[in-house]
Amino acid sequence: MMKAVIDWLVPRAHAASYSYSFLNPTSYTTSTSVGTLANRIIGYVLLIAGVLAVGYLIYSGILYITAAGNPDSAKKGQQGVINAIIGIIIIVLAFFIVRFAMGIGSSIGTGTIQ
């Protein structure tokens, strides 16, 4: 009897030890629900958008620094830096809004809001 319980419990305990983290997107999950899939896709999209925004910020900063007195180039670089910072703020807000919405969506069936 005890062996049957252990044989049933160990695989489930091992499966429950995997969890998904935005900071570690290579970790595995045991759930294949639509919400988990959407969460993963949105996480990857926001990660790519963040990398692109930081790359654009660096490019615009270099453009601004190397303007060498050219007002048009300096203005273009300055506007690029401002746009990149606004984009990064929007991406961070989108990340938190999605996490909040997923938290509410997952708690609807349980009757509790986390």
Image (tube, helix red, strand yellow):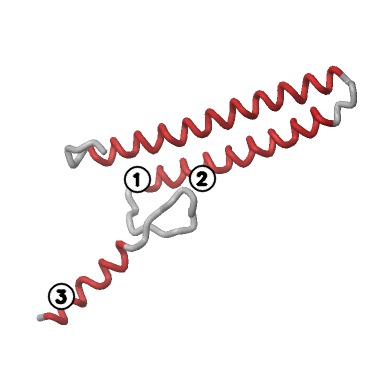
Q: Position of residue 112 (x, y in %)?
A: 19, 38
The alpha-carbon separation of the residues under discs 3 and 1 comes to 31 Å
Quadrant into which the C terminus falls: top left
Task: Return the mark for residue 5.
Answer: 3
Extreme-left residue of the structure: 1
Number of other residues with Cα within 10 Å of mark 2, as a class: few under 14, some 14 to 19, many 20 or more? some
**Foreground residue, 41 or 113?**
113
Quadrant into which the N terminus falls: bottom left
Q: Position of residue 106 (x, y in %)?
A: 27, 41
Dot placed on the residue nearer the N-terminal end, 3 or 1: 3
Q: On the rendered structure, is 52 left or right of 105?
A: right
Number of numbered tags placed on the structure image: 3
Indicate the quadrant where residue 12 lies. Answer: bottom left
Number of other residues with Cα within 10 Å of mark 3, as a class: few under 14, some 14 to 19, many 20 or more? few
Identify which amino acid the numbered label 3 is placed on. Answer: Val
Q: Is residue 43 above or below residue 31?
A: above
Does dot 2 land on a helix, a strand or a loop?
helix
Q: Position of residue 33 (x, y in %)?
A: 32, 49
Residue displayed at 18% across by 42% down: 110
Dot placed on the residue nearer the N-terminal end, 2 or 3: 3
Identify which amino acid the numbered label 1 is placed on. Answer: Val
Does dot 1 land on a helix, a strand or a loop?
helix
Q: Are marks 2 and 3 in contact (CB under 8 Å)?
A: no
Task: Return the mark for residue 44.
Answer: 2
| Mark nearer the viewer, 3 or 1 | 3
| Mark nearer the viewer, 1 or 2 | 2
Identify which amino acid the numbered label 2 is placed on. Answer: Tyr
Q: Are marks 1 and 2 in contact (CB under 8 Å)?
A: no
Does dot 3 land on a helix, a strand or a loop?
helix
The alpha-carbon separation of the residues under discs 1 and 2 comes to 15 Å
Q: Position of residue 27 (x, y in %)?
A: 45, 59
Task: Return the mark for residue 34.
Answer: 1
